[in-house]
Amino acid sequence: MNNPILLIVLAQMFGTSLWFSTNGVLKQIEQIWSLSTSDLGLLTNSVQFGFIIGTLLFSVTGFADKFKPSRIVMLCCFLGATSNALIVFEEISFTSVIFSRLVVGVALAGIYPIGMKLIISWNPQKAPNTLGLLVGMLVLGSSLPYLIRALGISFDWHYTVIITSGLCYIAGVTIYLMGDGPHLVTYEKPSFRLLDQVSELLGNRKYIASAVGYFGHMWELYAFWTCVPILIAISVSQHEIDKQEFIISLLSFLIIGIGFISCVLGGILAKPFGSSRVASLSLALSLSICLIYPLLGNLSFFLDLFLLMLWGFFVISDSPQFSAISASVCPKHLVGTALTTQNCVGFSISMITIFLTTHFHESLGLYFVWILLPGPILGLIFFSSQFGFFKQTTV
C-alpha cells in the first residue's frame, strides 16, 4: 500500500471518530442533561438520521461528483468537528445537543462515502484492499466503547469530545494537503440532472445487483450489532455465568471488533479470488449462522460464543467488497453519487431492522434473529443474478 492511501485511511479513521465520540461517555452526558433511556436512544439515532439526510443531499444535488472529493471531505471534517465540539458547553439545551449530533451525521455523509471515492481515485485496482481497511477501521471504532466499558476506564467527557474534534480537524487538513488521486473522474456537464443520473444508475444491472446485495447486508448488519449484547445477556443468564456486565461488554467488543480482521482479510483475498466471491460467500455464511443460531443457541455457552464470533466475522466482511464492486461497475463520473445513494438506502434500511429486532426480542425469544434473514436471502439472490453464486469477479 502506498503512502497516500495509508494517510487517507488514517485521516478517514480520525474523521469517522465523530461517529463514536459520545458512545464511551454516555453515562456522564446522561447525568449532565438528566436524560431518560429514550433520550439516549434519540442522541444515538440523531447521528444516523443526519447521515441519511446528508447522503440523500449529496445524491440529489450531485455534489458527490460535481466537486473534488478532497475538498468535500475537508469541509465536512471541519463542519463535523465544530458541531461535535459544541456539546462541551453544558449551558446549551438538550435540543441543541441533538441538533449538533444531527449535523455531525450530515458531515459524516461527506467524510465516509465520499472518502471511499477519494481512496478509489488513487488506485482503483486496490479498491477491495483499501476499502476493506477503511471499513475495518470503522468496525473497530464501533466496538471500542464496549471495551472501554468492560475495563471500567473513565474519561472526562469534555476531553473525549475535544480530542475527537481535534483529530477530525487534523483529518481535514491532511486530506486537503493530499488532494485527489490521478484516477479521479468528475461530472463535467454544467448542470446535474437528477433524473438523468438516476436512470443511468437504474439502467446499470450490475450496479443494481451490487447495491441490492449491499442493502441485504445492511438489513442484517447494524441490527445484529445492536442485538449482540442482548444475545450475550440471554446466554450468560441461561448458563449462570458470573460477572455478567463485564462479560457482556467484553464479548460484545470481541464479536463486533473481529469484523476488523475479516474486512482486512476479505480485501486481501479479493485479489486472488475476486470481490464478488468474497461478498457472496460472506453473505451466505452470515445468513447460515443467522438461520441456525436459534436452533442451537443456549445448548452451550461456548457454542453460543463460537457462533456469535463467526457471525461477527462474516456479517461485515462483504461490506467493503459490495462498495468496491459498485464503484467499479457504475459510470465513472457517478461513483460518488452511486456510493452515497447506496449508503443512504442501506442505513435507512438498517433503522427498520433495529426497531423490529429490539421490539420483538422479548416476545419471540432467540427466534427474533430470523427477522434478519430476508435481507441476506434477497441480497444474495439479486447479487447472484448478475455475478453468479461464488463466481470470481475481480474489481
Image: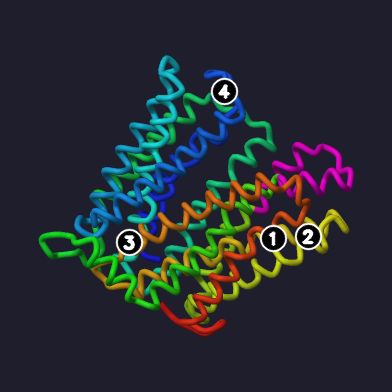
Res. 117 mark: 3
Between 72 and 45, the one nearer to me in the picture = 45
234 within the magenta span? yes
Nearest to N terminus: mark 4 or mark 3 = 4
Rounded to the nearest angstrom, the CA distance separating label 4 from label 3 is: 38 Å
Who comes first in sequence, dot 3 or dot 1? 3
Q: Earlier in the sequence, mark 2 or mark 3?
A: 3
Location of mark 1 (residue): 370
Residue 302 screen position, x and y as percent: 83, 57
Which residue appears at 50% of the width and 75% of the height?
382
**Of callouts 1 and 4, which one flags the residue occurring earlier in the amino acid sequence?**
4
Name the residue: 30% across, 56% down: 59
How far separated are the C-alphas under marks 1 and 2? 8 Å
For label 4, the SS is loop
- Residue appearing at x 69%, y 63% in the figure: 290
Q: Residue at x 57, y 18 (%)?
A: 34
Residue 356 image point, x, y percent: 62, 49
Residue named by callout 2: 294
User: Image height check: is 223 above or below 145?
Assistant: below
The residue most toward the left is 190
Q: Are marks 3 and 1 in contact (CB under 8 Å)?
A: no
SS label for mark 2: helix
The x and y percentages for residue 215 are 49, 63
Which amino acid type corresponds to the residue marked 1 in the rendered image? Trp
Boundaries of the magenta span: 230-255
Residue at the spot of label 4: 35
